[in-house]
Amino acid sequence: MKRKQERFRIIEERTNVIEPSKPIYNQIKGKWSSDYFKNDHPITVELACGRGEYSVGLGALFPQRNYIGVDVKGERIWKGSTWAVERGLANVAFLRTQILAIENFFGLDEIDEIWMTFPDPRPRKRDIKRRLTSPRFLEMYKRLLRPQGFFRLKTDNTILFEYTLEELQNRTDITDFAYTKDLYSSELRPECFDIRTRYEEEFAAKGESIKYLRFRFRQ
């Protein structure tokens, strides 16, 4: 408990973490470029980012883009924000909130790309509407993504992946849709830059294949 409280204290003092205790939390919508990053570089958002391996990894690879990891767990955000500080990545930030509330923090067409890496699969049928690729969430992403912006999903979970494929294949507003059920044997592998999350390492060690898909919304 002491360690947890200390980590919460640390992120409360960090400028690369936007959370409820800070005034900017309720003022940032539509103003990430002007008020936080202070540049007009493209913005990539990693939803359900966990420790933020993709936000930090991509931020290091592409300094001319901005990255925002979103998660509700303070301890996870502490880890990602620590990596970003240690690497001097001023183009990486973290937002602490539920994904369901994401439209409170981003304006229409404010995001250039969305990554979702190993989200909670919500395998029970009664939780289908809570899956982060269910129709209500997809509609939110469509509003927030700029025209031509990619949505990318990476997961080990077959139930979530098959569910997402079915949802996407039933839509008429999807373009540039591609997927693989075995990323590391696929021609799509370079799109993921071989960045691996902790969960990915664990699942791969157990012999689970890593699934990946990406698409754009047709405007």
Image: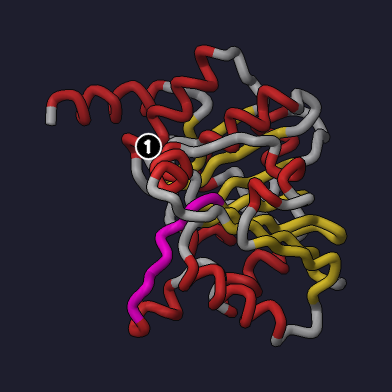
* Residue range (magenta): 117-124
In the figure, residue 151 lies in which quadrant?
bottom right
Q: Is residue 104 magenta?
A: no
In the image, taking residue 88 as reference, residue 202 lies left or right, namely: left
159, above or below 82, in the image: below
The main secondary structure of the magenta stretch is loop
Residue nearest the observer in this picture, 192 or 75: 192
Taking the spot 42% from the left edge, 65% from the top edge, the residue there is 121
| Residue 111 shows up from this direction | no
Secondary structure type for disc 1: helix
Coloring applied to the structure: secondary structure
Residue nearest the observer in this picture, 32 or 70: 70
User: Of all residues shown, which one is farthest toward the left?
Assistant: 1
In the figure, residue 19 lies in which quadrant?
top left
Taking the spot 77% from the left edge, 56% from the top edge, the residue there is 150
Q: Say which quadrant the C terminus sits in.
A: bottom right
In the image, residue 83 lies at what x, y percent?
Answer: 49, 21
In the image, residue 149 lies at what x, y percent?
Answer: 80, 56
In the image, taking residue 184 as reference, residue 171 lies left or right, namely: right
Taking the spot 21% from the left edge, 30% from the top edge, the residue there is 4
In the figure, residue 21 lies in which quadrant?
top left
The residue that mark 1 highlights is 76
Q: What's the amino acid at mark 1?
A: Arg
180, above or below 54, in the image: below
In the image, residue 190 lies at what x, y percent?
Answer: 76, 41
In the image, taking residue 145 as reference, residue 210 lies left or right, namely: left
| Residue 44 shows up from this direction | yes
Taking the spot 47% from the left edge, 26% from the top edge, the residue there is 81
In the image, residue 107 lies at what x, y percent?
Answer: 69, 56
141, above or below 155, in the image: below
